[in-house]
Amino acid sequence: MTPFAQNLIMVKGSVVDSITKTPVDAALLLQDAETLKTIKTGLTDLKGSFTLTAIPAGNYKLSIGAMGYKTRIVPINKIDSGILDLGTVLLAATSTRLKQVEIVATKPLIETTDDKIIYNAENDAAAKGSNAIDLLRKTPFVTVDGNDNIQLNGQSNFKVLLNGKETSLFALNLKDALKGFPGALVRKIEIITSPSAKYDAEGIGGIINIITDKKIAGSNGSVSSYYSTLTNYQGSANFNVRTGKIGITSMLSSSGSFSPIQSSTQSNTRTFNGMPYAQRILTGDRAGKNLGTFGTLEISYDIDSVNTLSAYASLGTSSRNSTLNQSINTIVTSDANSGGSLNLITDGGTDTDGFGLDYIKKGKKNKEEEFTVRFNGQLSKSKTITTSFQTGALASLDLMNDNREKNAEYTFQTDYSKPISALQKLETGIKVIARKAVSDYESLFRTNTADPYLPNPANTNNFRYRQHVYSAYASYNFKLGSYALRAGIRTEYTAVEGNFITTSKPITQSYTNFIPNLQATYKWNDKLSSVLSYTIRLQRPSITNLNPFIYNTDPLNITFGNPNLGAQTFHNVNLQTRFIKGNTFAGLTLYGSLSNNMISQYALFDPSTGVTSTTSGNIGKEKQISVIMSFSTKINKLNFGLNSIVRYNSVQTNSGLPVLQEGFSGNLFFNGNYKLNNWFNLSGSGGFLKQSYSVLGRGGSFIPYQVNVGYTLIKDKLSGTVNFNNFFKKDFNNKTYVQTDAFEQVNSNVSPYRVTYFGLTYKFGRLKENVSRKKGVSNDDLL
């Protein structure tokens, strides 16, 4: 057992051939001498040298192996000094060098560091037949409801990265992208609930970083697909190769549905003063389908043992269309009703492009020293055309809306990390994000289907929006006895320029945010630790919140953005206690948050026209206290876990909008996996969810569940899955509620709930693990 000590040690040395004395490309595995738990892994550099840092004093064994050589075991006993130099380690060649020497260590399903919780998906037998959404259900402090809505640390505002990088794959449509991302590609998922000052201040809940199997030498790949009883499909392929100093990673994925997905909707609006109607009920059927394709390519080049250069690019496209036919029953008075209809057709699509270049330089004497320069660009353009025709007593109008948007984001970032000693580390850096958004929108109308459409000047314009964010940070990490401490400060200056070209109405904003970041980790023993942190997080308004274009397909229910929105700030306090022993992990978090300038949607009802207007504003404050629990364990062949939240939140508006919503909400989700034998496994998940309160009102509650049967054949190369979702209930009725002093509205959407998925994955190639030096740009704020 490795006790936690006040001092950390560094182990270094070099590995050479016992006869030729030439450097050997070797792999290193440091394990606890008693429990055989993996503490560190690494590789030698081109000169055969290695350095393993930040190791608690203890008793270990170091396994050193290489292809064609006998594995060497070096015992390491407890020492008091800071550096252990093993000198030159000789490896003896085996009788034949055609056989590969492998050092195999099984990581636990859950691991922790001072600032991360890691779910090792590669050690989950069910992961090969799953998608990324399924894997997130098993990740600590992450919850996924029956509609695949994700929360991290109880928050729906967070950032998802792919191999540490911002990617348009997840910016396009997060739920669809994760559902179409094969679990067979995921090596691990990192969770950061309290990001350091190094990360952007935006992303309230934290960061989810999905790591794919890229640290390789050799070549491999996979192809996978799934199909559902709702005609949803997904197909993907990836290929990785590394030879010498060059590595190439590629992926292509396509998903959608062969036929439209059917659902039904109802909206019931009741006024409290009976003006201009007492009640209005819209009931109808919707049919819609989405198609999407996404591909990535990355090429890396190891200039030498300490310098790496990598370039990457991505392309994506999606299309969507839906039709909605509704009947309208308007109750004008208690004895006078009026019928009508509302037919809506939506057609649109989005194209995305991404590219980047990374340069990373490691220290020659200490690989923990690192200097990086990164550039990243993300481009997208989309169009949405909606046509609607409404008849009835209060409105009879044929509308067409054409909204086209372009977004560009360019990021330059440089970071420097310097270990001052085995117990201290300094990080600093600067970052510039330049964003440009354009919305060219036009609204047309006609009162007779035989007439041509006429423009509506009040809802036609060209909106230009620029946002520049300049930031700098410094973070100091140090050990003090049983404490690991982090103190950091980040400064972000935001400059905003907006303009309505047609009407020449400029918008100018600028603000500076100072973001303190404090964290203290106390290790009670080698199994139990507590983390206390405080920071300020930001939520800047997105282009959707800002765009003043009026979505008026239903003239009596309109939605539009607010170009005068400012950023929202959150004061966050976390107290998290973690217990980990072998394959058992338990975590308990007490989370508190306060915001006095909350960005929120709100609704206004005009009794003279009957129009309900929904927009956003910095209109109030929110208080939240949550208790978040996470647990996972392995008992023989059974992996079991749960994630749970109990939340009390209060939202209160000002500026003439006296609304107070408060109450308890939360969820409880279970997941499990049982390995029946070497070929088959059984897994499942399910739980209960009650949505939290917002200014618009309360959300509904529901109980999702799913069972999965998976198998692996041909030496784990071929895997398949059959997934049964919500098999006791055909449809799901998702209700939302809006209530003010003037009216109340209940919206209901009934969509297919019972569905079965069939999936297949085939992996090919052979790999030897390598150490990647690439990290990439990560914009941890949102647009």
Image (cartoon, rainbow, N blue to C red):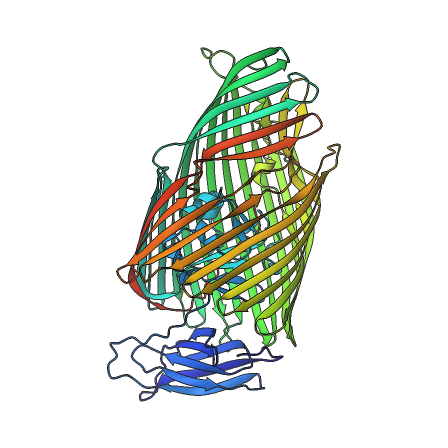
582 left or right, relative to 48: right
Farthest bottom residue in view: 19
* 577 up-or-down from 407: above or below: below
Residue 663: quadrant of the picture: top right
Measuring from the top left, give residue 439's x and y in whole percent: 53, 34
Is there any visible trace of residue 44 in the rendered image? Answer: no
Is there any visible trace of residue 167 in the rendered image? Answer: yes
410 left or right, relative to 130: right
Residue at figure coordinates x 36%, y 79% from the top left: 65
* 228 up-or-down from 586: above or below: above
Q: How many marks overall?
A: 0
| Front position in the image: 299 or 228 | 228
Residue at figure coordinates x 53%, y 53% from the top left: 142
Residue at figure coordinates x 47%, y 54% from the top left: 671
Residue 197: quadrant of the picture: bottom right
Measuring from the top left, give residue 461's x and y in whole percent: 56, 28
| Front position in the image: 532 or 458 | 532
